Amino acid sequence: MLEAICKHWPGPVSLALYLSDAEAQQFLRYAQASEVLKGRSNVGYHVVYRQGPFYPVNRLRNVALSNANTAYVFLTDADFLPMYGLYDYLRRAVVQQDLAHTKRALVVPAFETLRYRLSFPKSKEELLSMLDMGTLYTFRYHVWPRGHAPTDYARWRLAAAPYPVAWEADFEPYVVVRRDCPEFDPRFLGFGWNKVAHVLELDAQEFGLVVLPEAFMVHMPHAPSFDISKFRSSSSYRDCLSTLKDEFHQDLSRRYGAAALKYLTAQRPA
């Protein structure tokens, strides 16, 4: 995936890796031998050494964020491939949307494929054709539509200009923001609510969410992680996650006052 990402994305990369000592040495040998990676001086690797039973996903995100040396960052995960040309497109969008002087988070719409071998779409038109044929899907539409539904994919199909969307409960888009944005909450380990909490705090700090009409990324298939398997099979795991959500909401109320009450009521079942 890293080599594939670098072929799609010529810009700087700040990559956090969760590895044992042996894995770190193995990765170093791989990076030194890779024809794609050894010529890339703008890819930074930051190792967090493996410990504990759960994947510290938000700690890793914060490591990558703090080590980025650019004014703006595209916050994404390693199982996504950005569209060709996305780096240059985002550089223009940052200027056009005046991220230097406004609180905005630019949403890059996310899609997915179930195919390990994919002829990657070279344009929005080609992506829409693949959606219509069933080769691609909107991300997690079949298991977690709340996570990306506010992106408004129907509007995106026809959009020619960026458009604002409102925060909704459980929204977890992949965004471009200033590097001095809020950090990810490190309490969220493994699977569940790690990006949701971050986007929620962006909204609490009054970042506007703006969807980019010509941007997209595609999630590539892989085996289920250990943590999502635990989430699905363990009621204790899900109870712990619920407790963390409650703590997070309480902390938001202390930091942002009455304005944070909307997040608590949005999470309650109707």
Image (cartoon, rainbow, N blue to C red):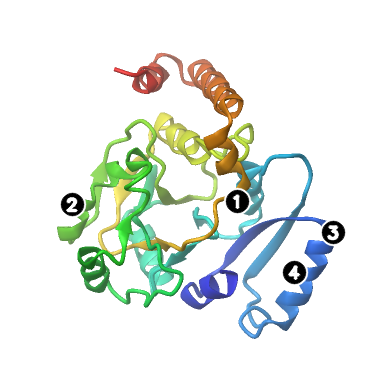
Residue at 32% across / 42% down in the picture? 145
Q: In this view, does 40 lie to the left or right of 110?
A: right
Comes first in the chain, label 3 or label 2: 3
Q: How far apart are marks 2 and 1 (CA)?
A: 32 Å
Which residue position holds label 4?
Answer: 27
Across and down, in percent, residue 212 comes to: 29, 57
Q: How far apart are marks 3 and 2 (CA)?
A: 47 Å
Q: Quadrant of residue 159?
A: bottom left
- What secondary structure is found at the residue carrying circle 2? helix
Comes first in the chain, label 4 or label 1: 4
- What secondary structure is found at the residue carrying circle 3? helix
Which residue position holds label 2?
Answer: 154
Residue at 61% across / 24% down in the picture? 236
Across and down, in percent, residue 77 comes to: 52, 55
Q: How far apart are marks 4 and 3 (CA)?
A: 10 Å
Disc 1: CA contacts within 10 A as few (<14), some (14-19) or many (>=20): many
Across and down, in percent, residue 45 comes to: 69, 63
Vertical position of residue 151 compared to residue 217: above or below: above
Which residue position holds label 3?
Answer: 21
- 239 and 195: which is toward the camera: 239
Residue at the bottom extreme, as displayed: 35
Residue at 41% across / 18% down in the picture? 264
Vertical position of residue 165 compared to residue 73: above or below: above
Q: Quadrant of residue 137?
A: bottom left
Disc 3: CA contacts within 10 A as few (<14), some (14-19) or many (>=20): few
